[in-house]
């Protein structure tokens, strides 16, 4: 054969590389392949696969594994001997695991699905471990590729033939993740509560605030005499049933956040309790990060950060890259009140990339959205950010993930500021596609986010009544479900600014709106004590608006505007700097100091341009400088 191939190689139809022969061009390969009758090709591929497999040593097999599996797969329907089919299924499992380890999820799903096809009903009796591992791994690979419809094909046989609850756990985990990714959070929670009950962890399905408070107090009492080092270096969890319960809680908490926040709080507390009582695991890193988020609301930012340190310490201890995406996401909830906002961007981007590599799609894509929101709020150039948003959205489309809905909102927000639009305040929140997507995933938090983004745009473009309407809608939604998110500071800031402009008009609602403005100012002052970097300019600017429009104290307002400009410039908040310039210009304009007004309007125009807010810059120019 070698001699014949050498002749072909001399004619240029093949290329010899060491002991291997390759076609020098795809077209030559296709032409040669077309000469083989179609009905003979499966047998030829099977023969090649068998020959290659038979000649490989154990060390060589790894290098040619994919080639062998591909050849055997193309002739697999001709394999009739069940022993050979089982041996080939084992090979598919090895190839699938190798591809999963290399984050080649689509390839892995192909190999693993081929392995399941080679099995039959008797395989669950005579080759139980192989059948269980192939179906469990195949379901995980299908999830990692976003093929949610294919997951049931692998999960259902496990639920039917699995010999114990522990054997079914991986299938349950994948099912919970898939339900969440499709936006079916209620179904995920219902399924998860049943699973937890079977694992000995009964939780109320519709808890009230008192239930959550009791669980929090119980957890606080358990933590009272422990320090960071005690927990971070504590015993490792070995109890299989408790480990399964922690893993289930680990997956469910995000979905509970969308369904019932009291239940979410109880789940977080239960994870922490199990970690203290039975030992820590890599999932415990997420437990303490999430507990820190709870503490940021009920105890304080400093307490939250102490639990954040435990979370990061556990990530390092277990080298837990597979939980990094969700730990980073949750830590961001309170670290934004301590660390410079811009400094969060590299961590979020890294968590997104690591999450995709590790197959933690849900949290990786969530980190992408938080990255975008944080970038917008920190004043990142909108033109540069726009290309990043497109990249994130493409990944969300690939994985058919509901995070695309929020990303679409951010994309519209940025587009309205960077491109010509008929109405820059319109985010198409009433469009059929947005309403349909939001109802499909049953997430009113998405609508709430849309209302806030439109409030922001409405204020920037001077439509204060629209901004107030958006605030009212958000408050109405918050009555049924309190929201707290990475946009809390900007929500407080822009709602406060809007409240000033509505209160100044007088009327029966003036005092209510003034109260909103003053409450927002007080919140910003409190947060400023934790991070002057992030909140000083916001506090100064809102205070300046209160003094100017509500107290008619122009001298004090002028000083506060100056402080807002200085702080925003010093800490690189480009969009807030532009706004501070603009509002300062309005002060001078009202004082009939047209020279100073024009000076600050020009500064504002340039600052908006530097931010990338071309539409807003044009709007300002046409209104004040044209």
Image: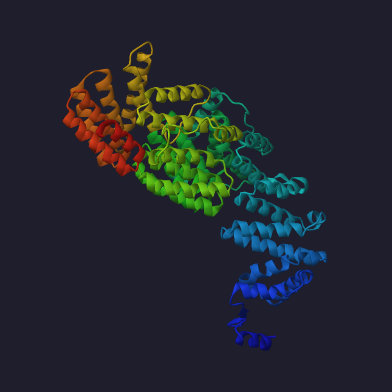
Task: From the top left corner, tell me how far across and down residue 448 is, in percent.
Answer: 49, 30
Query: Does 91 sit left or right of 295 as displayed?
Result: right
Q: In which quarter of the view is residue 279 placed?
A: top right
Q: Residue at left 54%, top 46%?
A: 396
In percent of width and height, residue 324 lies at: 49, 48
User: How far across and down, in percent of the image, does residue 88 sit?
Assistant: 74, 65
Quarter of the image for the N terminus: give it.
bottom right
Along the line of sight, which residue is nearer the eye, 130 or 365? 365
| Screen quadrant of the C terminus | top left
Above or below for 42 versus 491: below
The figure's colour scheme reads rainbow
Rendered residue at 42%/43% (across/down): 309
Looking at the picture, does residue 230 appear above or below residue 28? above
Q: Residue furthest top?
A: 508
Q: Is residue 314 visible?
A: no
Q: Nearer the viewer, residue 176 or 439?
A: 439
> From this viewpoint, which residue is outermost toward the front?
626
x and y, in percent, of residue 62 in the image:
62, 70
Is 142 or 509 nearer to us in this picture? 509
Residue at 28 percent across and 35 percent down: it is: 621
Q: Which quadrant holds residue 618?
A: top left
Number of numbered tags placed on the structure image:
0
Residue 80's place in the image compared with 556, above or below, is below
**Residue 189 visible (yes or no):** yes
Asked if residue 123 lies left or right of residue 578, the reply is right
């Amino acid at each position: 054969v070698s001699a014949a191939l050498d002749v072909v190689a001399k004619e240029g139809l093949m290329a010899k590389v060491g002991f291997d022969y390759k076609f020098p061009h795809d077209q030559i390969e296709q032409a040669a392949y077309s000469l083989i009758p179609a009905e003979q090709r499966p047998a030829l591929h099977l023969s090649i696969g068998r020959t290659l497999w038979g000649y490989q040593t154990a060390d060589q097999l790894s290098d040619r594994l994919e080639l062998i599996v591909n050849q055997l797969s193309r002739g697999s329907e001709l394999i009739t001997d069940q022993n050979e089919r089982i041996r080939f299924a084992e090979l598919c499992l090895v190839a699938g695991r190798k591809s999963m380890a290399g984050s080649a999820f689509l390839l892995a799903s192909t190999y693993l699905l081929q392995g399941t096809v080679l099995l039959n009903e008797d395989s669950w009796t005579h080759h139980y471990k192989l059948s269980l591992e192939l179906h469990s791994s195949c379901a995980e690979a299908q999830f990692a590729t976003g093929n949610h419809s294919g997951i049931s094909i692998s999960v259902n046989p496990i639920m039917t033939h699995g010999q114990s609850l522990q054997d079914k756990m991986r299938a349950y985990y994948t099912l919970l993740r898939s339900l969440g990714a499709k936006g079916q959070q209620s179904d995920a929670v219902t399924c998860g509560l049943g699973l937890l009950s079977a694992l000995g962890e009964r939780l109320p399905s519709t808890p009230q605030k008192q239930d959550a408070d009791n669980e929090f107090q119980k957890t606080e009492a358990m933590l009272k005499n422990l320090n960071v080092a005690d927990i971070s270096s504590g015993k490792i969890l070995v109890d299989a049933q408790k480990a399964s319960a922690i893993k289930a809680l680990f997956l469910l908490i995000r979905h509970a956040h969308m369904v019932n926040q009291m239940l979410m709080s109880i789940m977080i507390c239960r994870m922490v309790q199990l970690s203290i009582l039975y030992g820590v695991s890599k999932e415990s890193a997420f437990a303490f990060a999430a507990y820190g988020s709870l503490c940021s609301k009920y105890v304080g930012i400093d307490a939250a950060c102490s639990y954040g340190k435990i979370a990061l310490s556990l990530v390092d201890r277990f080298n837990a890259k597979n939980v990094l995406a969700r730990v980073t996401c949750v830590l961001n909830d309170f670290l934004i009140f301590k660390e410079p906002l811009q400094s969060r961007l590299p961590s979020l981007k890294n968590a997104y990339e690591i999450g995709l590599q590790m197959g933690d799609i849900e949290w990786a894509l969530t980190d992408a959205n938080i990255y975008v929101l944080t970038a917008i709020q920190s004043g990142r150039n909108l033109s540069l950010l726009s290309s990043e948003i497109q990249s994130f959205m493409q990944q969300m489309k690939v994985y058919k993930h509901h995070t695309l809905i929020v990303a679409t909102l951010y994309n519209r927000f940025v587009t309205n500021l960077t491109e010509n639009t008929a109405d820059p305040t319109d985010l198409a929140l009433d469009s059929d596609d947005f309403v349909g997507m939001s109802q499909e995933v049953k997430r009113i938090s998405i609508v709430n986010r849309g209302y806030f983004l439109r409030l922001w745009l409405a204020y920037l473009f001077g439509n204060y009544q629209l901004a107030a309407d958006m605030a009212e809608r958000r408050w109405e939604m918050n009555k049924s479900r309190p929201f707290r998110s990475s946009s809390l500071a900007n929500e407080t800031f822009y709602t406060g600014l809007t409240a000033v402009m509505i209160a100044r008009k007088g009327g029966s609602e003036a005092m209510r709106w003034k109260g909103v403005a003053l409450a927002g100012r007080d919140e910003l002052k409190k947060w400023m004590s934790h991070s002057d970097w992030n909140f000083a300019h916001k506090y100064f600017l809102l205070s300046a608006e209160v003094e100017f429009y509500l107290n008619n104290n122009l001298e004090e307002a002028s000083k506060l505007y100056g402080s807002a400009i200085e702080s925003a410039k010093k800490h690189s908040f480009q969009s807030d700097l532009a706004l501070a310039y603009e509002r300062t210009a309005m002060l001078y304009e009202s004082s009939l100091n047209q020279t100073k007004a024009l000076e600050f309007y020009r500064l504002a125009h340039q600052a908006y341009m530097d931010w990338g807010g071309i539409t807003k810059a044009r709007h300002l120019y046409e209104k004040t400088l044209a």
